[in-house]
Image (spheres, rainbow, N blue to C red):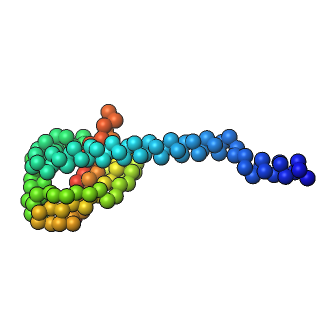
């Protein structure tokens, strides 16, 4: 009986090698996503500082290649003036949500982090800013999308 109980314990608690590898892979994946998200948040913060300073042309230059390929700098600046002027200067900004994804509708395949901030603009307190950094071919993170609600 003791041998049967010992074997049962081994059967119940021993994890097959392939399952251990799956757990290790999942842990590595979670760590990679966390590192990517941290890098994307840092890149978004630097980019938002440029935007908040009213340097719209520079925000385009510092944006992702995908962004620059679909909109000219002049159109980008014009669009930002139309969006940012009515809300006024940005004040307190708090990250409220982040989501790592490998696919976005209408966007090229890649790695993205969707960031949402609660931002108190002078003319629109409690606005929701969405910033979407993507990983570039060189491994850096750059903003590919920006929206205010």
Residue at figure coordinates x 21%, y 64% from the top left: 127
- Percent x, y of residue 34: 41, 46
**Among the 4 quarters of the image, the one containing residue 17:** top right
Using residue 35 as the reference point, say whether residue 62 is left or right of it. Answer: left
For the point 9% across and 55% down, the residue is 81
Answer yes or no: is residue 16 visible.
yes
**Left/right of residue 21 with respect to residue 57 in the rendered view:** right
Residue farthest to the front?
2
The residue sitting at 63% across, 43% down in the picture is 20
Question: Who's the residue at 17% across and 66% down the image?
Answer: 125
Which residue appears farthest toward the top when viewing the image? 138
Viewer-proximal residue among 41 and 107? 41
Q: On screen, 86 above or below 99? A: below
Query: Can see residue 148?
Result: no
Quadrant assignment, res 99: bottom left
Residue 8: x, y in percent? 81, 52
* Residue 88 in the image: above or below residue 49: below
Relative to the observer, which residue lies in front, 71 or 9?
9
As rendered, which of 4 and 59 lies closer to the eye? 4
Image coordinates for residue 102, horizontal then vertical, percent: 40, 48
**In the visual, does 11 lie left or right of 31?**
right
Q: How many marks do you count on the picture? A: 0
Q: Classify residue 37 as left or right of residue 24.
A: left
Q: Position of residue 93 (x, y in %)?
A: 22, 57
């Amino acid at each position: 009986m003791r041998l049967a109980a010992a074997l049962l314990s081994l059967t119940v608690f021993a994890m097959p090698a392939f399952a251990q590898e799956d757990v290790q892979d999942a842990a590595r994946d979670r760590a990679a996503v966390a590192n990517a998200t941290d890098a994307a948040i840092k890149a978004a913060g630097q980019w938002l500082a440029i935007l908040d300073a009213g340097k719209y042309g520079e925000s385009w230059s510092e944006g992702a290649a995908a962004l620059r390929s679909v909109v000219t700098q002049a159109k980008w600046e014009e669009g930002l003036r139309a969006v940012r002027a009515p809300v006024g200067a940005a004040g307190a900004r708090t990250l409220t949500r982040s989501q790592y994804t490998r696919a976005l509708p209408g966007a090229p395949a890649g790695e993205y982090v969707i960031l949402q901030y609660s931002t108190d603009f002078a003319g629109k307190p409690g606005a929701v800013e969405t910033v979407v950094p993507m990983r570039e071919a060189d491994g850096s993170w750059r903003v590919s999308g920006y929206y205010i609600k």
